[in-house]
Amino acid sequence: MASIQSFANNPYQENTYILYDETGECVIIDPGMETGREQNAVVNFIREKGLKPVLLLNTHCHIDHVLGNKFIFDQYGLKPKFHEGELPLLEAVIAYAPSMGFRYDPSPVPDEFLPEEGSIHFGNSELKLIFAPGHSPAHLCFYDVKDNLLVGGDVLFRGSIGRTDLPGGNFSQLIDNIEQKLFALPDDCTVYPGHGQPTTIGYEKQTNPFLT
């Protein structure tokens, strides 16, 4: 059975997640750590739990989700994995980070990219890939079928959806992917978004003003 821990990082209060199971292996998803304090919180949690980081995943490559990629690589030797369609976004971060007031250590580039469909494994756990662009060109969500939880990045929020006014955004595409792919998951599936509090698929079906 998998457990999940979140850390709200950087001025955008981006949710960094550590997903781990009974084997002690863990996955770090969207490391947004900017400060030493934020970095220490993640490292200390991993150390105190006796976890072994084996994967670094990015749902997408906007700056607030990749600020800590280089730190995780330096700390644990993990290069990120994401869909190849996000690579231009990652490459663009170097140019615009200073104008946003961020000191950005450039992220390593993946040795291999993730496909639109399939699954990835760690420990005794499996994460199904759900390709859901619209907020960004090649956004992926990670669904743990056994534990019925979704690490959804910036696709679906509690009472809201991801913004679509950034480069590569597409409102109708985002809505279609939420309704056709995410809303196909069980109503009691817990959604862990890139910002804000967790929600469930059923709650958003009934109450989300963008989707009802």
Image (cartoon, helix red, strand yellow):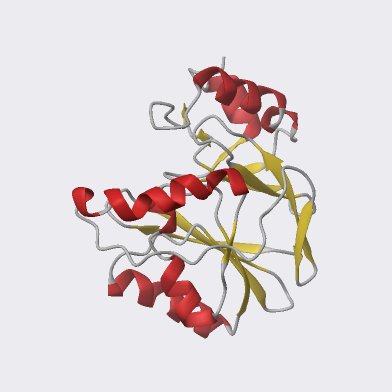
**Residue 192's spot in the image, x, y percent?**
55, 47
**Residue 125's spot in the image, x, y percent?**
77, 64
Residue sitting farthest toward the top: 212
User: Which residue is more in the foreground, 34 or 3?
Assistant: 34
- The quarter of the picture where residue 66 lies is bottom left
**Residue 196's spot in the image, x, y percent?**
42, 44
- Residue at 68% over, 79% down: 24
Judged left or right of residue 123, residue 179 is left
Q: In this view, does 138 lie above or below 169?
A: below
Q: In this view, does 173 lie above or below 143?
A: above
Q: Is residue 45 above or below residue 92?
A: below
In which quadrant of the rendered image does the N terminus lie?
A: bottom right
In which quadrant of the rendered image does the C terminus lie?
A: top right
Q: In this view, does 30 lie above or below 173?
A: below
Judged left or right of residue 24, residue 146 is right
- Residue at 55% over, 55% down: 58
- Residue at 70% over, 38% down: 188
**Is residue 194 visible in the rendered structure shown here?**
no
**Is residue 12 visible in the rendered structure shown here?**
yes
Judged left or right of residue 39, residue 29 is right
How many numbered marks appear? 0
- Residue at 67% over, 61% down: 112
**Residue 68's spot in the image, x, y percent?**
41, 65
